[in-house]
Image (spheres, rainbow, N blue to C red):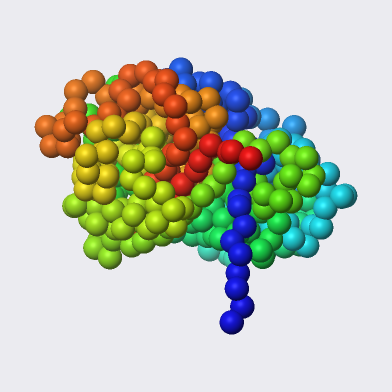
Amino acid sequence: MRTVTLRRVVITGMGAITPIGNDVNTFWNNMKAGMSGAGPITKFDTTEFKTKFACELKGLDIEAFIEKKEARKMDTFTQYAMVVAHEAIQNSGVDLEKIDRSRFGVIWASGNGGMQTFEDQIVEFTQNNFVPKFSPFFIPRLISDIAAGQIAIKYGLMGINYCTVSACASSNSALVDAFNYIRLGKANMIIAGGSEGPITRAGIAGFNALKALSTRNDDAMHASRPFDKDRDGFVMGEGAGAIILEDYEHAIARGATIYGEMVGGAMSCDAYHLTATHPEGAGAQLGMKEALADAGLKLEDVDYINAHATSTPLGDISELKAIQATFGEHASKLNISATKSMTGHLLGAAGAIEAIACIKAIQDDIVPPTINTTELAEDIPQGLNLTIGQAQKRVINVALSNTFGFGGHNAIAAFAKFRG
């Protein structure tokens, strides 16, 4: 029988574009400051829509990263992926000419893929009396796996390459997969993350039909309010996050800067409902326990949990119940925060930017805040530190990032402070 020695997996590069910053440092500084990224939707006329606001990107110049001709061949979610991949590659300091690119892969995530492309092409199809004159780039722009392919093509990365789709758990699924491939010795480096461009007419109307979005149109800045008694749904966000995971020995050999370590991960399913979480967070409990076991961590080792907490009435409660049931007495000793209160919900890209928040929190020993929460709901479990209002200093050695998606998908990633 073959014996496999599991390798250490470290983080050597990061990239982010979010509603509160178009690079990792700006994103993190604004997150620590408790900035809200919400505002009126500018992408289309919202007159007939129930929700008229979202967390849009601001001031991003795509053509500063992608030639105009090439950008036209890409949906927005792929454009976003290319921007953050560029930052992550630069941040990693890797010389692509000096490494084996057949062992450098891309595992990318998107819950929805090319929503804007699909909407635009179908509208044009109907306006042209259903004459099928589709763009030759319709399918290549639409399919969810294309971002992984585009990143690989640009940088000549010939290793493992595919897309994960597990709704709002998608990019944590990508991170867990990348972690496992590297520690099993199947790759030296992998760019993992996710991107989403869901602020479209169909995207907003579709989630409105599910009654999932907040309709607090008179107070958009404070609409994402996890755990609050008046929370009424999530705020749509857009953007992307990229993390370069790397074999520790490979990183040391090339003199890379190491920002943190990924130490475990797990995926589970609620097996309960199409869109609702299990009332007691059964799948979330299983996922967190499995992630800790995978990392060889005890309950008391965890200092911070970046909660999935989207600001929905059912989801926020079930997650906190799951945390309390999983951690027992230690639940009151760790910090929890809901950073979607600032960024909105980036769907399949949420896990990637929240993983970056965890890594930065570990680096700086700062827990980012939960903003907009003014009065906790009566059914919120008692005795938990939800980091309300402002960031909190504390030593963070281990952080968990929770993500949950429609269909009952759960993906949890565990990160730790790097110690050589």
The residue closer to the viewer here, 368 or 142, is 368
Spot the residue most to the right.
97
Identified at 60% across, 73% down, the residue is 3
Q: Quadrant of the N terminus?
A: bottom right
Kindly indicate the quadrant of the structure image that contains residue 90: top right
Q: Quadrant of the C terminus?
A: top right
Q: Is residue 49 left or right of residue 108?
A: left
- In the rendered image, residue 164, in percent from the top left (x then y), is placed at 53, 60
Compared to 308, does 384 lie above or below? Answer: above
Compared to 301, does 178 lie above or below? Answer: below
Identified at 60% across, 30% down, the residue is 24
- In the rendered image, residue 342, in percent from the top left (x then y), is placed at 41, 28
Q: Is residue 4 left or right of residue 47?
A: right
Identified at 22% across, 29% down, the residue is 228
Kindly indicate the quadrant of the structure image that contains residue 39: top left
The residue closer to the viewer here, 248 or 50, is 248
Kindly indicate the quadrant of the structure image that contains residue 153: bottom right
The mark total stands at 0
- In the rendered image, residue 286, in percent from the top left (x then y), is placed at 31, 58
State whether residue 336 appears in this view: yes
Spot the residue most to the bottom.
1
Q: Is residue 315 left or right of residue 419?
A: left
The residue closer to the viewer here, 326 or 175, is 326
Identified at 40% across, 52% down, the residue is 292
State whether residue 121 appears in this view: no
